[in-house]
Structure formats: C-alpha cells, structure tokens
Amino acid sequence: MDNLPPLASLIAFDAVYRTGSVTKAASMLGRTHSAISKQLHQLQDHAGVTMFEKSGAGIQLTPDGRAFAQVVSDSLEDMRKAYHKLCGDDGAQRITIKVSSTFARLWAVPTVARFNIDHPEIEVQIKLTTVENASNGDGGVDLVLSWDRLTSPLAEHPNAISLGDVHIGPVLSPVYDHAYDGGSLRFQTRISRRGFEQAWGKWSELSGIDIVSSHETIYDLSALSYEAAERAMGVTLAPKFLIERELKEGSLIAPAGFVLFREGLLVRPSRERPRPSKHAIVFLDWLEENGRLGDDGFLAPTIVEPLWG
C-alpha cells in the first residue's frame, strides 16, 4: 500500500494512546518496553513528524500525534468490529435466543439458569416470538429454538441441532364432552394458536385420526390455549413437555394420543447470523449435553422447573 507504516507500529502506537504509557502498552500487547519504544520511533521516523516527546520518565503525545492516534484508534476499532462480524462474534460475552413465551417460561428460563451456573461469564438473553415477528425473519438473535413440527417441518431447518423427541396431540379436560372411537375425535370447540390454525389438519393427516368440531376459538399465546383447555373450554394441540404438570396431575388428558416427531425439539442459528459466535457455540455444545428432553417426551429430570406456577 502507498507509503503506509508497518501495521505493528500502528498497533503499538494505538496501545500507547489507549493506556497512556509505553510500559502499560507493552504489558497489554505482551511485548517488551524496548520493542514498543522501537516501534514508536519507527512510526515517527516513517512519518517525518514529531508525534511524541519525553515527559519525565515517560512520553506524551504531541497535538499532531494525538490527532493521528485518534484516527488510528478508530480505524483499528472498526477493523476489530468488522472482523468479529465476519467471524460471527460481536465481541460481547452474550448471546440472544428466540423462543415462544410459553416455551421460555417452562423450558428456556430454567435451562438458561442451569447454563449460567456452568458459564457465568456468558449472558443469555431471551427474545420472545410473537405472531407478528414469526413471519418476518428471525431478527437480531443468535439462536432460534422451536418445537412445532406441525407447521415448521424438520426439512426447513437443515442446520438445526436436535434436543429430543417432541410428542404433539390434542388435549382436553377430563370433564369436557368428547367422543373418541379410534378413528375420529369429536368435540365442540377447537382451540387454536393464532397464525397456526393449519396445525389441526396436519396432525389429522399424520395421525390418521379425523378431528370433528363445530367451533373454533383462537388465542395469541400457547399458554392461554392450554389454560382454556384445562378449564374445559375446548380442545387444543400441545407438546407433552409444555403440559407435563397438567398431564401428570390429570387436569389434561390426551384420549387420541400423540404424534411423535423424532428429534423434533430444535435449536438453530438465526438466518441473520448463520455463523454462530464462539459464545453461541459454547451454549449449543452445552445444550446437547444438558438440555435434551427425556425419552418420554417430558422435561429431563435435570431441568429444574420454575418456582412459579
């Protein structure tokens, strides 16, 4: 390049500017005091301009040197940021995951709490999926977790890592009026999650069981659908691991059973950040060992349930 000084001398100059002394710059760069001093003189000789002068036992930058140091510092910082972006790492010790609100409460929060014990240096931020942002890309997040294989098949997530099998089926209160004869499930009200009403048809197709209902109620959140079903307001589709308590206590039942999606709980890099950062990779590796569902489709015993109801 035209008449530019050696990059090593610019890095040394920037370190002196940032730390305020040759000694601290040498410590920051892992170099000797004499090596940093030599690079500073090399830069000054190359420029032909006085950029620093002795001040007591140290040096201080001249006005010309300080002005140039600011440009060098800003340029190197831009290079660092661009390189981190190239490598999929913004340099911060944090990652952001995108999940549904019900999934966040019952799986993500307790799982992240355990991750924080093993890796307190990495902050995991949770961003919620909404009806509005579900179809507008992944947004500025690192990882996306999903379980709804009825509306988002496995084939759509080729770069995903699986965290276990997902069992999805129609659930209802044991006191809710219904009829199941092995080939059809009949009831009055079908409870759907807004934007995912087509899941009923897909479940019927995969299970071979006809769903016969005369009315549909739609909620924005899965949690509301599950609560409405528990209160005998209709029938909703749910994965076993998000209604584990209700199934085990008997407040929800699944007379027609569940469709099994092998390795259906997925975590994948976001479309906007297809190359995971080093911190996201740490989280992914940890999840493969510690975040899987149990073989029965319920939360693994190591996943601590949240303290609230």
Image (tube, rainbow, N blue to C red):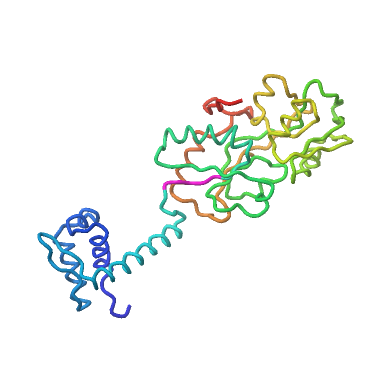
Q: Residue at left 81%, top 30%?
A: 234
In this view of the protein, which residue sits in the foreground, 18 or 300?
18
- For the record, the magenta segment spans 93-97
Magenta stretch: dominant secondary structure: strand
The part of the image, by quadrant, that contains residue 242 is: top right
Q: Is residue 49 magenta?
A: no
Name the quadrant containing residue 259.
top right
Q: Is residue 95 magenta?
A: yes
The quarter in which the N terminus is drawn is bottom left
Which residue is at 36% across, 67% downward? 75
- Where does residue 176 sit, x and y in percent of width and height? 82, 24
Q: Residue at x 70, y 34 (%)?
A: 260
Going by the image, does 273 lie left or right of 87?
A: right
- Relative placement, left or right, of 250 versus 234 is left
Residue 113 picture location, percent across and down: 49, 33
Please report the residue visible at 62 percent of the width from the left and 49 percent of the height from the top. Answer: 157
